[in-house]
Image (tube, coloured by chain):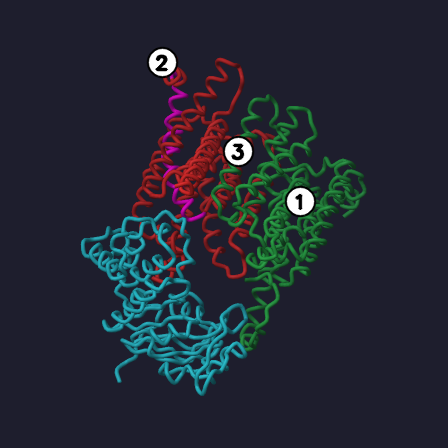
Chain colours: A green, B cyan, C red
Amino acid sequence: MNHLLDLYDSTIMQRALIEAALVGALCGAVGIHVLLRRLPFFTITVAHATFPGVVLAVILGASVLTGAVVFALLLVLGIWLTGVEERLATSTVVGVALAGSFGVGAMLQSTQNGFTKDLASILVGQIIAVQRGDLIATAIIGGLVLATMVSTHKELVLSAFDRTEAQAQGHSRTVDLLALLIVAAAVVTTVPAVGTILSVALLTIPAMTARLVTRRVETAMVTSAAIGALAGVVGLTISAQWRVAAGAAITLTAAGLFLLVLLFTTVTRRATSTEKAVVFPDAGRTPELAR
Amino acid sequence: MNEPLLHVDHLTVAYDRQIVVHDMTMQVSAGESVALIGPNGAGKSTFIKSVLGLVPIHSGSVQVLGRPSVDMRRHIAYVPQHDHLDPQFPITVQQVVMMGRYRTIGWMHRPKRQDRDAARAALQQVGLANRAGDSFGSLSGGQRQRVLIARAIAQDAKLLLLDEPFNGVDSTTQDVLLEVLSSLRAGGAAVVMATHDLSVAHLACGHACVLNRHLVAFGPIGTTLGSDALVAAYGHQAVVLAEGTAMIHAH
Amino acid sequence: MFAGIRLITEPFEPPYMQRALIAMLLLALLAGVVGVVVQLRRLAFMTDAMTHTVFPGVAIAFFMGDSLFVGALIAAGTSAVVLTLLARHPRIDEDALVAFVLATFFSVGVIVVSRNRTFTADLNQLLFGRVLTISTRDVVEIAIVCVLCFASLYALRKELLLRSFDPVGAAALGYPTVIIDMALNLLIALVVVAAVRAVGTALVVALLTTPAATARIVSSRITTMMVLSCAIGAIGGWLGLVISYDASIHYDVRLAAGATTVVVLTVAFAAVAVAFALARRRHARQAVVS
């Protein structure tokens, strides 16, 4: 226990904990949109697309964040312009983009000697190496993303639920672009902390968990953000305690929480389902998470 | 009276704690056809799915020829709405119709001469014999619906379940469908079709089943589709015109 | 002309390059056919997930000193079973589930290797493969997987076609859809395992999606798509090896063969997509004029 208190005492660890809580909460909230719009495949594709950007930035000596942002933007624009955002969940074109961008990154990376260490940190993240500047960047991007989400909440939710209705009001495609940009921003912010591959975990698993316990979009967002932050802090503590990779520990914590909640809700549902099943639902439906 | 082909006995279906079909009882004999009428969300599709064993039954039973419908699935043909299928899918009309024969052909085996003949005859019956080699997606919506009916014909089923077969189809297709359905009934098949088009229901079916999460009315179509049943199912969407007749507001 | 022939023969004089070429061509054949099925069944995301879920198996097998092939097979097989069974859960979205399984399995792998010193080198090999150090035994294993996959796909061709085109219809006809889905997912797992050590996860996804996607633009007949997809994969694999060899011998630039193949395949896809889009636009314009 003393060891644990010592851990929380060090500046490095404090910074890492704040970062984990921040990206956990941000990804948790954004994750609800990832689920509503069926964007998990897109999310992991954006994460892969930042890879060549990061490699190029390292080669050119530019800022890693800039490289990631530029390539994520290129991907979002490419997808938006080709108009496949309607069926992103299953589109083969997304698979092509994912493999292609990863291939470009790998080819660039193979031209450099002694690059493998940086590469590994891109893939699994290095939350312990987070600097003050990174924290500030996370807070600013996170704040901007959340502000955008709050101010355009109605439009985002409407266009996810009822595409024909949204198109009738004439702003569906712009809102689609906005949603993709929000997810991409969350990915770019998360990658340095937990890595490309595991950023998709923070952007889906807390939201999946929240969705098991609540159906209202707004409640789900708050719950999911809380779960994300909790998974970040607990996972990071476990990682420091037992010296395992932080990104992986955070992911497994989030996964464990999900499985616990799934088990719990399944058991309680089974216990109550027989008597509740006789109640007729009301006909007028508000947007719900479950279909 | 001989044993009914489809026997639904006190069927209740619940999805995720919500009752979708409540305590429904009805019978359909060979050669009969029944129109399932009801507003959106009344449980028409869910009822069809429960016959096919695609949604769990909460209580009650669905029997086909005296056996649980789930065991009789190869004798039940399901015709989905044509727009539920991906028109981009690389498949020919002939291949789609042949799917109706798959259970007869069996795992591993190739289609035999009689399967190809059955597929060809089915396409002929819906007037699309000359399109066999074309890709499914190159057809119009109505033609696609006819291909799906041809698939059901090729299956040689005893019970046909159709989900809104007349939705958004051209008049040629409507005529072909009506003709095909009556010839299938003459051949001893029973037909159950979900629809919200009352005029088409009158043309295609001898019986009607008005549904709004529970059975509102069931019987010969002329007497069943009275204003009382429709008002009960549709609420104020139903407009009573004259004594005993009503119409439904288009959505 | 002479230079052209030299380009074909010269890189493949060393035996290791010959083995690499044979492995690459076999994988192009395998992935070309399976890739079309992946596309029809819309499993691109699941395939990508599978390339990550093999990781814990590889990592654990590495530390236990067991065969990496067996380790990868167990991990990929387990994830295929989990994905098939949980996908039927009424309260979980299928693609969210794929992301969940992907991240969880991958994390277990990362935890296993993060406690070891050679972590980064192993991770690197898993991601990009080592096609140039491939052994004759590896080539034989890939060939066996090829035969197995083709035989299973041929046996299940009707059921897979029906399940892909009309998923509800397949269930309505009383087909055991769990078994059909499970069989396909296990086949994909097998392909991923066979390919991943040779060419790495990045190239596996590329081989399984990009050639099939390119073929789909050109053709809408499934058999034609399969032939085209194999041919595109094979040409891409060969070009990748040649370019990578040429760059290192003549220009002293190191280019990973697997990654180069991915880039070649992606460029080919983009070129075909743009060419067909332009052709279609011109066609539409002529139709309007006449």
Q: Which of marks 2 and 3 is nearer the N terminus?
A: 2
Q: Which residue lies furthest to the top in this view?
A: C2
Q: How far apart are marks 3 and 1 (CA)?
A: 24 Å
Q: What element carries label 3?
A: helix
Instruction: Give the chain of mark 2.
Output: C
Residue on which the image places disc 2: C1
Specify the quadrant of the image occupied by residue B128.
bottom left
x, y percentage for residue A46? Answer: 59, 40
Q: In which quarter of the image is the C terminus of chain C?
A: top left
Write the start and end of the magenta stretch as one range. Answer: C13-42
Residue carrying label 3:
C127
Frontmost of labels 2 and 3 is 2
The lab-note entry on whether marks 2 and 3 share a chain reads: yes
Chain of the residue that carries numbered disc 1 in the rendered image: A
What is the distance, in whole Å, between disc 1 and disc 2 at their CAs?
53 Å
Q: Which residue is drawn at 54% across and 46% down?
A: A41
Determine whether, in the image, residue A283 is placed left or right of residue B248. Answer: right
Q: Do labels 3 and 1 share a chain?
A: no
**Which label sits in the foreground, 3 or 1?**
1
Neighbour tally class for label 1: few under 14, some 14-19, many 20 plus, Cα within 10 Å:
many
Is there a contact, CB below 8 Å, between mark 2 and mark 3? Answer: no
- Graded by Cα atoms within 10 Å as few (under 14), some (14 to 19) or many (20 or more), the crowding at tag 3 reads many
The reply to whether residue C68 is visible in this rendering is no
Image quadrant in which the N terminus of chain C is located: top left
Residue extending farthest left: B113
In the image as oriented, which residue stretches furthest toward the front?
A: C290
Rendered position, B26 above or below C45: below
Same subunit, labels 1 and 2: the answer reads: no
